[in-house]
Image (cartoon, rainbow, N blue to C red):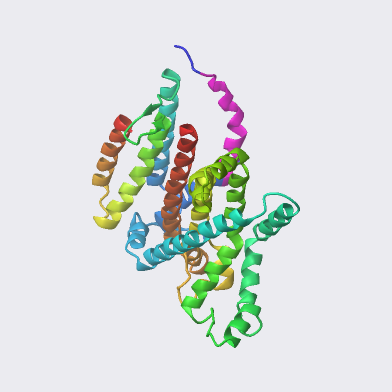
């Protein structure tokens, strides 16, 4: 079977991006297997979040951080990535 | 290691996961791929990096469409919510009037969006439309094709006509669920009509009102068909909302890269709003 995916216009950077998301999801699944229940807790947002919620918030927030960086600073996104990692650590620690 | 529940049940959602993958995830991946490239057709792509995102975030056209969308959502919420509450409060609670009112209220919701647009496009015309002709006959200049204010008024009235019923039906559901004992107690205490509304009806409608506001906001933020059919985004760009601008870029200009970048930003905004919607609703339920 010839699976032609050229219409999806794949590039290495976007493939790496989706690969990272996939690995994150695999990591979350492994974490859930090792420590079931999702670790629900009430953090600074004053409502209950599980670690899946915290991953979602980290990814969504990171997307907005990158967009804000692009719009306000410039196209060099390494600092935006660093800021996103700090933000994600903050979300997983305090939210 | 003790499991709190049986995670094997997740396998039951596998068919839905496959369906969503084909209908949403794969197209979304393609949009991400397009957003960092340029194409002149024939399935040939050139790397553009973050260029389209930068261009979009510095584009007045995008921010103006966003501002129009937010202003539109704010206006229709400011009209539809109080009007919906007012109509629901005045609808009969017993007798033959109930089904009649419910059917009348449900009618606009059953009409497809493009038909609503067509109805108002003809209705507002100043040569053959009932509204346009008679408003002009009264000496008020009205032409939604040429005047941007008239176009806005038409689009807003059309949305109010189409969607206030949803707010009415939700509020009515909240109102009829209030037990008679509350009204009897208020009567014994000699409560005024306003006091009954403020301290009994409004708190009891809080949940449905929350649903109504969030639903109408999300829906109006994604509005496309009705204004597109009536005004086509015009005159000029005066009623070009985000979705109309997106379609113009993707299909009108065939700028797939910039359109993909715009789609993703739009998608992220909708995702954020959906998350807020979901969080507010689930926490409201948990508190109760």
Q: B191 or B114, which lies in front?
A: B191
Looking at the picture, how far across and down is residue A9, in whole percent? Answer: 47, 51
Location of residue B167 by image quarter: bottom right
Looking at the picture, how far across and down is residue B55, in whole percent? Answer: 34, 62
In the image, residue B277 sits, relative to residue B241, either above or below, namely above
Q: Is residue A23 visible?
A: no
**Which contiguous range is marked in magenta?**
B5-23
Left or right: residue B101 versus residue B273 is right
Looking at the picture, how far across and down is residue B212, in whole percent? Answer: 53, 50
Left or right: residue B192 versus residue A35 is right
Left or right: residue B49 versus residue B266 is left
Q: B204 or B212, which lies in front?
A: B204
In the image, residue B98 sits, relative to residue A41, either above or below, namely below
Q: Main secondary structure of the magenta part?
A: helix
Can you say which quadrant of the picture contains the C terminus of chain A? top left
Residue drawn at (36%, 34%) of the image? A46
Location of residue B122 by image quarter: bottom right
Membership of B17 in magenta stretch: yes
Q: A52 or B164, which lies in front?
A: B164
């Amino acid at each position: 079977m010839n699976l032609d995916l050229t219409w999806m216009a794949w590039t290495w950077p976007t493939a790496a991006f989706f690969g990272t998301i996939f690995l994150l999801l695999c990591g979350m699944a492994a974490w859930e297997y090792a420590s079931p229940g999702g670790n629900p807790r009430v953090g600074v947002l004053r409502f209950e979040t599980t670690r899946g919620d915290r991953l979602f918030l980290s990814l969504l927030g990171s997307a907005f951080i990158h967009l804000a960086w692009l719009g306000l600073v410039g196209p060099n996104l390494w600092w935006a990535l660093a800021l996103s990692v700090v933000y994600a650590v903050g979300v997983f620690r305090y939210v | 290691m003790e499991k709190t529940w049986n995670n094997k049940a997740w396998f039951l959602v596998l068919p839905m996961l496959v369906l969503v993958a084909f209908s949403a995830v794969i197209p979304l991946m393609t949009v991400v791929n397009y957003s960092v490239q340029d194409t002149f057709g024939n399935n040939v792509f050139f790397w553009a990096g973050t260029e389209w995102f930068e261009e979009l975030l510095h584009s007045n056209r995008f921010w103006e469409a966003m501002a129009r969308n937010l202003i539109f959502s704010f206006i229709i919420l400011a009209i539809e919510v109080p009007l919906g509450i007012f109509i629901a409060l005045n609808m009969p609670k017993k007798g033959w009037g109930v089904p009649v009112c419910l059917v009348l209220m449900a009618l606009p919701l059953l009409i497809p969006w493009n038909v609503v647009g067509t109805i108002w496009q003809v209705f507002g015309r100043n040569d053959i439309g009932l509204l346009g002709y008679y408003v002009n006959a009264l000496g008020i200049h009205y032409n939604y094709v040429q005047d941007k204010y008239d176009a806005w008024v038409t689009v807003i009235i059309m949305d109010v006509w189409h969607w206030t019923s949803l707010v009415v039906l939700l509020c009515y559901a909240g109102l009829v669920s209030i037990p008679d004992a509350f009204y009897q107690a208020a009567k014994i205490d000699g409560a005024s009509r306003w006091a009954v509304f403020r301290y009994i009806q409004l708190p009891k409608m809080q949940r449905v009102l929350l649903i109504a506001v969030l639903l109408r906001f999300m829906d109006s933020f994604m509005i496309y068909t009705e204004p597109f059919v009536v005004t086509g985004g015009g005159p000029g760009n005066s009623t070009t909302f985000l979705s109309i601008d997106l379609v113009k870029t993707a299909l009108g200009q065939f700028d797939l890269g910039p359109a993909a970048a715009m789609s993703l930003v739009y998608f992220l905004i909708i995702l954020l709003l959906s998350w807020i919607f979901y969080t507010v609703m689930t926490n409201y339920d948990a508190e109760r």
